Amino acid sequence: ANFRRIRESFKSNLEAKMIGLFIKTNPRKLFVLGFDTEGLRPPVWQGGESEALARLERHLERKAWVASFGHPKMTPQSLMASQTGLSPYLRFGCLSTRLFHYQLTDLYKKVKKATPPLSLHGQLLWREFFYCAATNNPNFDKMVGNPICVQIPWDKNPEALAKWSNGQTGFPWIDAVMTQLREEGWIHHLARHAVACFLTRGDLWISWEEGMKVFEELLLDADWSVNAGSWMWHSCSSFFQQFFHCYCPVRFGRKADPNGDFIRKYLPILRNYPNQHIHEPWTAPESVQKAAKCIVSKDYPLPIVNHRNISRINMERMKQVYQQLSRYRGPGIVASAPDRKGTLLVLNPHVGSKENKNFSKFNLLREIHNDQENKIMEAVKEEIDYFENQFMNEPERAGTSANKKQIYSLSQKN
């Protein structure tokens, strides 16, 4: 099954290169391939190995960044696709992962005169981590039949899924991110966290499999193992269990895009809203909405849910799932972060089964025997600790009297 996926990936890679060559030589004839080109912006990403190597060179020119490397901080500028972005090129094989790793390491040694910390290669390590986790698990991209995935009774809500996918949730930050994804094929990895949490355990309670399919379709850097693994992580279905840490779609947006420039770029309907209300347009007085030429519920949708209420309900639902697992498997087993010995405990509902024996502890990477593997696990745990402390819940304001009744009636339905 995995070989078939690799073959299909190679086929799609070849097709993508052929299409890329066609577009490069016939940039105005994209409609021949059946695409509607009217009103399209110039492409953000140019394909090919030459472009990948040029981007790598620009990336490595940032010696100050390499020397002072820390955890990535999200700024309004980092939300936009960068001329040094490399993820699509790694995904399509236009850039060698090994080349990137060693050139980055060599540069760090020259600048700092020391061996680089493993966190410098954090994103590459995550890639290898998920590749390893998916090994010999053909159901890695599914919930049912996946021995490392918690079985959660997600809701089926095609209407809500479509609104999320098309950027029509009524939360400007979420909608702007999903619009960027559709238009450009890329979004910042912390933005991915936000929209994934919103779709699954945070707000809509829709299966991570549905979100994974949307990302698979739209993301230029979508990678089978990484995509599925990331969605299981964000939804607390595997690898990560801090379900009480929920991304607030309002607070997250304010922190990432305090002036609303990102929202104005991808949701021009809201461009005339003042900074005070652009993340929560439903709180704007009617006079402000009219002045902005955008009436909430008419020109821009009301929030699809009341985040404050529904997030608490969903946390309780997740709590019940985890409590059931704890009773089912025994205390101390419900964990998905490295313990003090560096061993990662993985949730598995198949009690007493062969899969349980194989996966009850972190046999995906096998037992940790040497210092190097311990360091890798420390780097993985460091990433988990960093992200789990980001953007805690902050209840959004209820809104103006004109919108308040509509918003809370939505929360009762959800």
Image (spheres, rainbow, N blue to C red):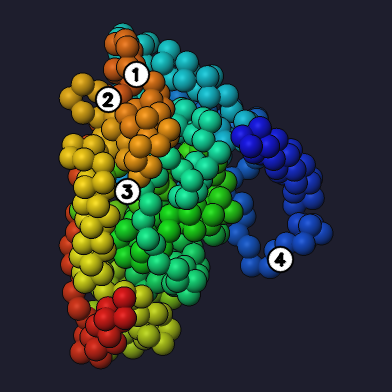
Q: Residue at x 73, y 62 (%)?
A: 35
Q: Are marks 3 and 1 in contact (CB under 8 Å)?
A: no
Give the mark nearest the N terminus, 3 or 1.
Answer: 3
Q: Residue at x 48, y 46 (%)?
A: 145
Question: Looking at the picture, how far across and down is residue 293, in whole percent?
Answer: 39, 85
Give the residue at the far front of this rendering: 352
| Residue under label 4 | 36
- Label 4 or label 3, whichever lies nearer to me, is 3
- Indicate the secondary structure of the residue bearing disc 4: loop
Q: Residue at x 20, y 78 (%)?
A: 398
Front residue of 216/333: it is 333
Give the mark nearest the N terminus, 4 or 1.
Answer: 4
- Indicate the secondary structure of the residue bearing disc 3: loop
| Whether residue 394 is situated above or below residue 338 in the rendered picture | below
Q: Residue at x 21, y 71 (%)?
A: 309
| Residue under label 2 | 343
Which quarter of the figure has residue 311?
Answer: bottom left
Q: Are marks 1 and 2 in contact (CB under 8 Å)?
A: yes
| Residue under label 3 | 236
